[in-house]
Structures are given as C-alpha cells and as structure tokens.
Amino acid sequence: MNSAHFTLYEGDITENGWLNSVFEKEKPAVVVHIAGLTGVSASFQRPYDFFTNNVTGTLNILEAAGRHGTGKLVYLSTVSVYGDSVDPATEDKTPASPVSPYAASKWMGEELCRQYAVTGNLQIAVLRLCTVYGPRQRPNMAVAQFVSKALGGEKIPVYGDATGIRDYLYIGDCVDGIMKAMAHAASFDIFNIGGNEG
C-alpha cells in the first residue's frame, strides 16, 4: 500500500512510543487528526474506550506535534457537540452542550486543541462535521442501509413519525473542507462543515 506519495502506518494513538516514532520519522508539517472512535449509541455502551481514544489519543497527538515541530493540525470533531439544539448551530453563538459520551469526548478533544493553540506554536482548525456519507462508508450508517435496501428491493424502515431531518455531508465535500482547513492560517478556529439543510 506504500507509494511515493503515501505510507501507511498501522498503530494506536494511545500508544505514545509508536506515535512518536511515526512523528520522528515523518516530521509532518501538517497533521489531519481523524483517528478515534465514532458513534453515539456505541459510546453509551463503551464510554471508557471513547474517552481513552478520543481524549487521551488527541492529547498524545498534540504532544507529539509540539515535540516534533508540526506547525498545523486539523482536528475532525462533530456537530454532536451542540447536543439537542434545534436551531441551526453557529460556531460563535451556539454553546457546546454534548449529550453523549461520544460528543463529550470530541468536545474535550476540541478544548485540548484550544489550549495547545494558545500555549504553543501550533495552528489548529477544528472541523465540526455533520454525518458523512459516500463510498466506503460504515455499513451501519443510515444512508448506506437505505441505499442497500433500495437496491435490494426491500422496504426502507421509517423511525418515529418520519418528520426528522438530518444534514448529511458527502465525503468529497468533507475532503474539500479538510483541504481548505489545511491552508487556513490562524492560531485557532472552529468551522461547521455542513449546511444546516436537511
């Protein structure tokens, strides 16, 4: 899987020795931090795993970035940090109010990023993503299940009263947002990636 433009390292961001060996070898100028556990429901069943991966793992990445001279970090978070807010969330006016261990762990990762941006030489952009869909997405996600059932001629299940609306983000648009965040120059910023449109 290696090429002139890509090297795959498989490891665990909670293992400092492994993580620092990668930073030492690669000396990245920019890090896009996508690693961690996702899923609201699963976080209620395994809260310790979520906090270990999403908080301790993020702290380890921030420490390694500072130790090895990384200049910029893009941290992928979630609009779940807004909790049950019914109004369109804005980065500067809607307070974080997480209602699941997953959302709380991502928000704590954001706060660690804020502290490291203030106290270090690291520029950080936090991207709060809505639900991402597209090729190779997790098969348990709604869009993948709906498409699979539709292609198989099966009925698509309806939950609740069918009036719920979600904002979905296509993976290509997500990547575009990440690329723009990599080029963004500021000590610390938070950006919602999604349009608040169902």
Image (cartoon, helix red, strand yellow):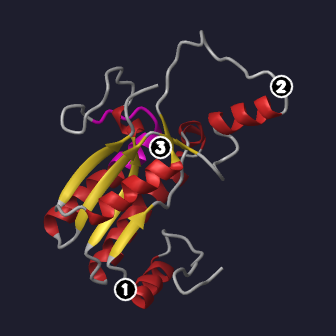
Residue 126, how many percent across, how many down? 31, 53
Is residue 85 positioned above or below 8 on the image? above
Quarter of the figure with residue 113:
bottom left
Q: Secondary structure at mark 2?
A: loop
Q: What residue span does the magenta drawing correspond to? A: 96-107
State how far apart marks 1 and 3 are (Cα). 30 Å
Q: Amino acid at mark 2?
A: Glu
Is residue 89 positioned above or below 176 on the image? above
Residue drawn at (29%, 36%), measured in percent from left and top? Answer: 96
Q: Around disc 2, counting alpha carbons within 10 Å, would you say few (fewer than 14), some (14 to 19), or many (20 or more)?
A: few
Quarter of the figure with residue 128:
top left
Q: Nearer the viewer, mark 2 or mark 3?
A: 2
Looking at the image, which is closer to me, 57 or 34? Answer: 34
Residue drawn at (37%, 61%), measured in percent from left and top? Answer: 179
Number of numbered tags placed on the structure image: 3
Is residue 174 positioned above or below 3 on the image? above
Q: Around disc 1, counting alpha carbons within 10 Å, would you say few (fewer than 14), some (14 to 19), or many (20 or more)?
A: some
Q: Which residue of the protein is positioned furthest toward the bottom in this rendering?
A: 25
Image side of residue 195 versus residue 35, left or right: left
Q: Amino acid at mark 3?
A: Tyr
Quarter of the figure with residue 141:
top right
- Is residue 99 one of those drawn in magenta? yes
Q: Which residue of the protein is positioned furthest toward the top in this rendering?
A: 161
Badge number at residue 102: 3
- Is residue 166 one of those drawn in magenta? no
Q: Nearer the viewer, mark 1 or mark 3?
A: 1
Mark 2 or 3 closer to N-term? 3
Residue to which mark 2 is pinned:
154
Residue to which mark 1 is pinned:
27
